[in-house]
Image (cartoon, rainbow, N blue to C red):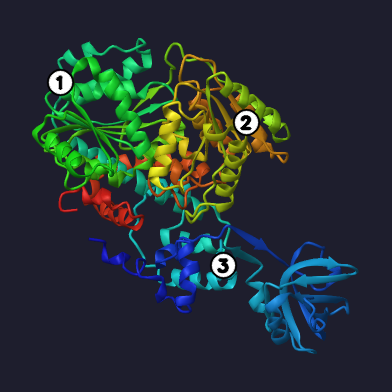
Amino acid sequence: MRPEALNPLFAQVEMLEGVGPKLMKPLEKLGLTRIKDVAYHLPERFVSRRAVADLDSASEGEQVVIALTAIEHRAPRAGSRGPYRVLAQDDAGNICALTWFGRAAFSGKKLVPVGEKRWVAGRLDRYGDMLQIVHPDHIETESAAHMARLSEPVYRLSDGLTQPRIADFARQALGRVPDLPEWIEPGQLERAGWPAWREALRLAHESTDPKARDRLAYDELLANSLALLLVKADGRRRRGQALVGDGALRAKLQLPFALTGAQARSIAEIAGDMAQEAPMLRLLQGDVGAGKTVVALNAMLIAVEAGKQAALLAPTEILARQHFETLRKMLGPTGAEIALLTGRAKGRERESILMGLLDGSIQMLVGTHAIFQDTVNYRDLGLVVIDEQHRFGVAQRLALAAKGRRAPHTLAMTATPIPRSLTLAQYGEMDVSRLDELPPGRQAIDTRVVAIEREGEVIEGVARHIAGGQQAYWVCPMVREADGAPDMADIAAAEARYASLKERFGEAVVLVHGQLRPEVKDAAMERFASGEARLLVATTVIEVGVDVPSATLMVIEQAERFGLAQLHQLRGRVGRGSEKSTCLLLRGAALSETGRARLALMRETQDGFRIAEEDLTLRGGGELLGTRQSGEAGFRIADLEQTQRLLPIAHSDARLLMERDGGLTSPRGEAARILLYLFERDWGVQLLRGG
């Protein structure tokens, strides 16, 4: 149960004065549906203004507060779209135009009567030979009201909301914020000189005080660390099953390559975990092509050798099918039974799989979320492997773990190398194995940056490549907007590129993007994977896991629009066979410094772990940890710089609370419990008995 003290914060945003049905949509678009969301909707920046006695003492481009008296109103000519102007003068007789466009002209007519003095706040600019303030931020009859606005917050908006409106909602929300007990360790609070929680929220809305922002970021990081530690502690406490294989099935595997040192080390770490009664919770981080599947297969065979079942969960149907085919081939000599279950399995086929899982004749299962539906039951599930870990949040991982008779061991895998500094933030509850060596025989991919003006030459190169019997990818950007809606212009661009390449190559070209119906997408992928189609035009849906060894050319259009980690993942779709592979990064004419640095690094290195670290540096502290990068909801308050600086402290404070300060039963622990609910990490609390 959520603590009563938090009820005012979780009340709906309609409780605020002025929030009607009309404003609900723009507020929802910003994710502001509860009082808490508004209180944590912190300003993006602050406008600093200077109070000036007259226009002579102000500079063009400066934000000012000045007393002006209106002398004339000038409406635009009938039928013209010109602005509404009010000519006003300062105490020294200098003239300035206050200018409004469109419907805002109503403000000018009403707020500045001729002959009366008003205090005006806004940016002073010049139009022709006259000074002007376009759409003044504020107009007041009293100067005192303006003096308080010399530093003013600027909030992120959506259509239908204005700065004054959102500032008013923030003020009302702060008025409803309760006093909460302190959850930060007193010594840490004193060392950092941070304000109390409620005061920090107020200061963050009213000033640029870095200590207030740091305090709020630390709260979020502490909640996350604490929840992940609770998951880890719960895992150790729960009774799992110690699984030790006899090696019989693994001895029959006939792998084309010897294992790398990193693979052998990771398999030993996993076998060591599975031999314990406490359920394993391990993350296998592997660079593109480092051989995670072989490591996962060894783990699954340990479970089968010990008489249990293993399940592998993939985020998409395409990936599930691909894993199934790869594992089935490798498992051939062992005789182990493996099945594929996706949402598409119907009727008798589905019935037969469900029966095989229940009677234990199916020892391994690969599939999408369908494998954990309520109707799917296992005879004795001993291991769950989750591929592309970043697509599944902690809460989902916990739901999976509840499927076994006893808690199954969990191995999570990700092909997105994560900077060491962020591993704690996303996987604090897991032990980590890293595959940082490439298998022998993998050749470096020849990476080149090509200007878009040379597009004709690139298409000729693709033609020669296809004529030589090989396959190629052509990737177009697919940038999703913040609210999750696809950018239709990007889809149109991918479809236009497909149409132009189809004119040249005919039926040898297929198209895949996220807006296609699943069966259309799968059919196109199938034609490409079987070699029937030679060129695949796609958006980033192919970024993870697609494995076509005879595809040896990757063209990435508008490469400067992709992040480094994404470019690295896309490049990893080629170079998967024994042939030499090439990646062409097509860049636009306007290239930012960051874009230039990204492309240069791609040319220079193929080490995904180095690329991840550099990506973090290049993106800088300004960009928040997004959902793609951080598993579940990401961090809303803590930016990258704060995460790197404050997370280690928050993590050790969380550990201190759990190990020395009486956990969540001590007075500070009770406060920390409130913190978990405040940041909706309450799945951590649910793990406590009687939580």
- Determine whether 600 is above or below 1 in the image: above
> Is mark 3 in CB contact (under 8 Å) with mark 2?
no
Secondary structure under tag 3 reads loop
Give the image quarter of residue 304.
top left
> Is mark 3 in CB contact (under 8 Å) with mark 1?
no
**Badge 2 is on which residue?**
585
Q: Earlier in the sequence, mark 1 or mark 2?
A: 1
Say which mark, if any, is on residue 553: none
Say whether residue 365 is left or right of residue 58: left
Mark 2: which amino acid?
A: Leu
**Badge 1 is on which residue?**
305
**Badge 3 is on which residue?**
159
- Determine whether 187 is above or below 469 in the image: below
In front: label 3 or label 2: 2
- Determine whether 555 is above or below 336 in the image: below
Compute the Cα span from label 3 to label 2: 36 Å
Q: Residue furthest left?
A: 359
Q: Is residue 423 visible?
A: yes
Residue 71 spot, x, y in % from top left: 83, 86
Compute the Cα span from label 3 to label 1: 60 Å
Secondary structure under tag 1 reads helix
Mark 3: which amino acid?
A: Asp
